[in-house]
Image (cartoon, grey):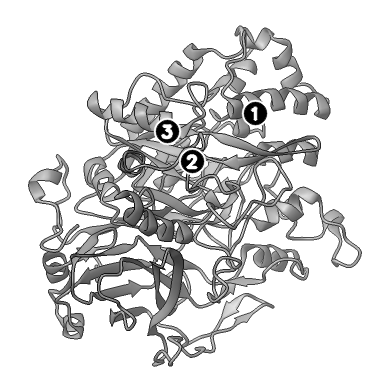
């Protein structure tokens, strides 16, 4: 395939355990017919809710032939094959929950075109799609991709019977592999809306409005796709109708970082002012957002957060199918959206951006690539080797001198991330308990590390609670966990407890990011609240450098630096009575080699000088909102 074709495809137990008062769900509401007893203090579960198989048009075209069954087998720890023939297997323990989320628009159509004897296989488009001429393939693929983007039902091509049959197979596969108490699967799909915001030579620059749609249990006979409407507000109406019909469901936006200001803009899809009804409808249907995945991080951007030294992390900002850079001034990042939500609460009486956080992979080869040491990227044959993704020099060269990296690798593949996980605090590993945890936003995101993270807020919390063996139970009883609203007039106190992933680096620091508005202006501040290696935050609320290093000759990390766990009680030293605010936790590990450096090390070459050599894996909690009373 040429880089031209690959361009278009981017279109497409220490911690085991929502208002003040006991914030736990009564056991009767989450009782499951399984062998796992319900834990009122909740357990943490790790999963992936963004997975593509051969049923997605932009996976099949790159030789992906693995199925939803294969996805679940991978999640349970089995080995599957990459399109290039090598093995894919989780480095750590099996996942706890998953959803396959293939693109609903033109679901299964490319496989039908590639199957002799079908009606679609007889189309000229099918012959072009699987010809040996790359330009011919590109032109045919662009027709499908454009129809997905624009919501067009191409006459003689789009077949709802194919969509319905493949969707039934996806739902059946989720049912087959769902094992309450052991491994949870959800029926789901991706709603693939794109707003064409800027034209460019040879194509378009599209603002991403993609969402993953996940069902709590039962699912309808057909998904709602862009061929039904490209307006996400129509998706929310359909979801409201589904709940009325007994199919509880939520949608999870992702890659706001490449939305060109569209995902969290301060007006409706059609350019109208936001209203209370809009805000309530949106947050009812979208209680959480995906803030980390293979296509980068959506927390914030250095241009938006110049005083945040850790904002420049795995930034990916190229619009879908394009070399055009997304806008960052408004609408692309969740931290800014949190501030805008507080402002809207004061103006219209509701907050459309009152959301929690998760991560997921967006893998298009069925198995998510979470580990920096063993990265296989996203798409398939296009980016499945170190040379193709720009982490080693092309043609067997041993030096980067004079090397021109392929534009796709330079702009896209080399900037992609080994990320991420959705983490959920739930009473049991079951559809009901995990979905309900996502609904109440007791979730957090990680970049592929399995950090365990607790975050509670309350008015009666004290530092002494940190040593109380009943700390978690008391925190639930007297406060709220991540995702909750802390309603009152006193200064809030927060308990943060993080434990390292034994397979990753030790913890370096824990931070609280405060977001508020003042006079209608968005404000933010980063507070280090727990430091490793005996450090304490200075007058600027920063931990001292703990001296952790990475040896780039072998990617070994500093011994005896960092902490296995960090626990802290914190009160906002700048709290103002009556001022709404949101607070979320960010946990940083010691530095490790980035996946591109690992690729170079194995190839015996220097790392690509255009790329970051190391990263700090991290986790982000869902916010806690301080809601002052009159």
Identify the image quadrant of the N terminus: top right
Separation of marks 2 and 1 at Cα, in angstroms: 18 Å
Regarding residue 534, the answer to whether it shows in the image is yes
Question: Are there few (<14), some (14-19), or many (20+) residues within 10 Å of tag 3?
Answer: some
Q: Quadrant of the C terminus?
A: bottom left
Is residue 246 visible in the rendered structure shown here? Answer: no
Q: Which mark is residue 233?
A: 3
Q: Nearer the viewer, mark 1 or mark 3?
A: 3
Is 29 or 483 nearer to us in this picture? 483
SS for callout 2: loop
**Mark 3: secondary structure:** helix
| Residues packed near mark 1 inside 10 Å, few (<14), some (14 to 19) or many (20 plus) | many
**Which x, y percent locates residue 585?**
37, 69
Is 75 situated above or below 333? Answer: above
User: First in sequence: mark 2 or mark 1?
Assistant: 2
Reading the chain from its start, which is encountered first: label 1 or label 3?
A: 1
Residue under numbered circle 2 = 51
> Contact (CB < 8 A) between labels 1 and 3?
no
At 34% from the left and 80% from the top, the residue drawn is 566
């Amino acid at each position: 395939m040429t880089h031209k074709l690959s361009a278009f495809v981017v279109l497409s137990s220490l911690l085991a355990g929502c208002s003040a008062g006991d914030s736990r769900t009564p056991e009767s509401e989450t009782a499951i017919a399984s062998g796992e007893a319900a834990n009122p203090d909740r357990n943490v579960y790790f999963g992936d809710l963004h997975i593509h198989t051969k049923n997605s048009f932009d996976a099949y075209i790159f030789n992906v032939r693995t199925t939803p069954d294969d996805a679940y087998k991978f999640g349970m720890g089995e080995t599957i094959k990459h399109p290039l023939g090598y093995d894919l297997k989780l480095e750590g323990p099996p996942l706890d929950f998953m959803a396959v989320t293939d693109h609903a628009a033109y679901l299964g159509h490319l496989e039908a075109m590639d199957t002799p004897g079908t009606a679609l296989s007889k189309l000229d488009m099918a012959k072009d799609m699987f010809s040996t001429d790359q330009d011919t393939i590109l032109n045919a693929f662009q027709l499908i991709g454009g129809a997905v983007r624009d919501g067009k039902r191409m006459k003689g091509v789009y077949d709802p019977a194919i969509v319905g049959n493949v969707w039934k197979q996806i739902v059946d596969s989720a049912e087959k592999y769902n094992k309450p108490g052991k491994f949870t699967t959800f029926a789901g799909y991706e709603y693939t809306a794109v707003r064409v915001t800027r034209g460019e030579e040879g194509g378009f620059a599209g603002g991403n409005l993609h969402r993953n749609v996940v069902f709590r249990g039962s699912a309808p006979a057909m998904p709602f796709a862009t061929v039904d409407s490209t307006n996400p507000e129509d998706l929310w109406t359909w979801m409201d109708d589904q709940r009325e019909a007994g199919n509880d469901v939520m949608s999870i936006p992702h890659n706001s970082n490449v939305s060109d200001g569209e995902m969290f803009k301060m007006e409706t899809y059609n350019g109208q002012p936001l209203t209370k009804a809009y805000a309530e409808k949106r947050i009812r249907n979208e209680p959480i957002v995906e803030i980390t995945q293979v296509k980068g991080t959506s927390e914030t951007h250095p241009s938006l957060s110049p005083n945040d030294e850790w904002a420049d992390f795995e930034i990916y900002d190229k619009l879908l199918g394009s070399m055009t850079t997304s806008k960052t001034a408004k609408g692309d990042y969740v931290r800014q959206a949190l501030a805008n939500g507080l402002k809207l609460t004061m103006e219209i009486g509701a907050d459309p951006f009152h959301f929690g956080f998760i991560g997921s992979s967006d893998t298009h080869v069925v198995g998510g690539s979470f580990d920096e040491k063993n990265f296989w990227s996203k798409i398939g044959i296009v980016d499945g080797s170190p040379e193709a993704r720009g982490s080693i020099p092309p043609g067997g060269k041993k030096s980067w001198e004079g090397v021109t990296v392929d534009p796709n690798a330079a702009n896209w593949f080399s900037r992609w991330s080994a990320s991420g996980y959705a983490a959920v605090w739930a009473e049991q590993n079951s559809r009901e308990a995990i979905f309900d945890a996502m609904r109440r936003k007791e979730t957090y995101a990680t970049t592929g590390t399995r950090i365990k993270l607790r975050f509670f807020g309350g008015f009666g919390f004290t530092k002494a609670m940190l040593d109380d063996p009943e700390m978690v139970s008391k925190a639930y009883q007297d406060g709220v966990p991540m995702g909750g609203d802390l309603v009152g007039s006193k200064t809030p106190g927060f308990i943060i407890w993080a434990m390292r992933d034994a397979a990753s680096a030790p913890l370096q620091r824990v931070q609280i990011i405060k977001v508020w508005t003042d006079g209608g202006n968005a404000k933010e501040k980063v507070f280090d609240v727990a430091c490793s290696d005996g450090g304490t935050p200075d007058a600027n609320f920063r931990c001292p450098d703990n001296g952790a290093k990475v040896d780039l000759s072998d990617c070994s990390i500093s011994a005896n630096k960092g902490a296995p766990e960090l626990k802290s009680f914190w009160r906002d030293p700048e709290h103002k009575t009556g001022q709404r605010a949101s607070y979320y936790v960010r946990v940083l590990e010691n530095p490790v080699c980035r996946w591109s450096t690992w690729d170079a090390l194995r190839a015996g070459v220097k790392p690509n000088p255009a790329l970051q050599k190391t990263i700090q894996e991290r986790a982000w909690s869902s916010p806690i909102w301080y809601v002052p009373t009159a």
